[in-house]
Image: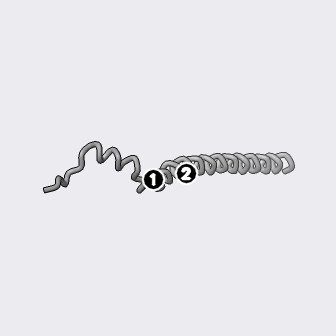
Amino acid sequence: MPCCRATAADLIRRTGRDQRGAATLEFGLCAAAFLALLIGTLQVALVFFVQHSVQTAAESIARRVLTG
């Protein structure tokens, strides 16, 4: 009767050749870094937008105060 259980050596040999799921794992690692970079870029853009809006509003109010 043949043994149905794999030995440790069999598992190690199969693990080295098994490529199933490698693309999914690589995508997960790259996607996390890309998503963090994208969110950081959007936050910096939002800060610049708000800074420009506040500066424009302050200039407009100062101009109205000075000119009446």
Residue 9 lies in what quarter of the image?
top left
Left-right relation of 44 to 32: right
Residue 54, percent from left and from top: 71, 48
Label 1 sits on a secondary structure element that is: helix
Q: Quadrant of the N terminus?
A: bottom left
Which residue matches tag 2? 35
**Is 56 in front, or is 7?**
7
Circle count: 2
**Is 62 in front, or is 47?**
47
**Is 68 in front, or is 4?**
4
Which residue matches tag 1? 22
Q: Which residue is situated farthest in the front direction here?
A: 1
Q: Which residue is located at x 79 percent, y 47 percent?
A: 59
Q: Which residue is located at x 52 percent, y 52 percent?
A: 31
Q: Earlier in the sequence, mark 1 or mark 2?
A: 1
Instruction: Rate crowding at label 2 as few (under 14), some (14 to 19) or many (20 or more) other CA atoms within 10 Å.
Output: few
Amino acid under disc 2 = Leu
Q: Which residue is located at x 24 percent, y 49 percent?
A: 6
Amino acid under disc 1 = Ala
Q: Which residue is located at x 24 percent, y 45 percent?
A: 7
Residue 35, percent from left and from top: 55, 51
Left-right relation of 52 to 31: right
- The image's colour scheme reads one colour
* Measured Cα–Cα span from mark 1 to mark 2: 20 Å
**Is 63 in front, or is 37?**
37
Label 2 sits on a secondary structure element that is: helix
Tell me whether the residue at label 1 lies in contact with that at label 2, contact meaning CB atoms closer than 8 angstroms.
no
The numbered mark at residue 8 is none
Residue 56, percent from left and from top: 76, 50
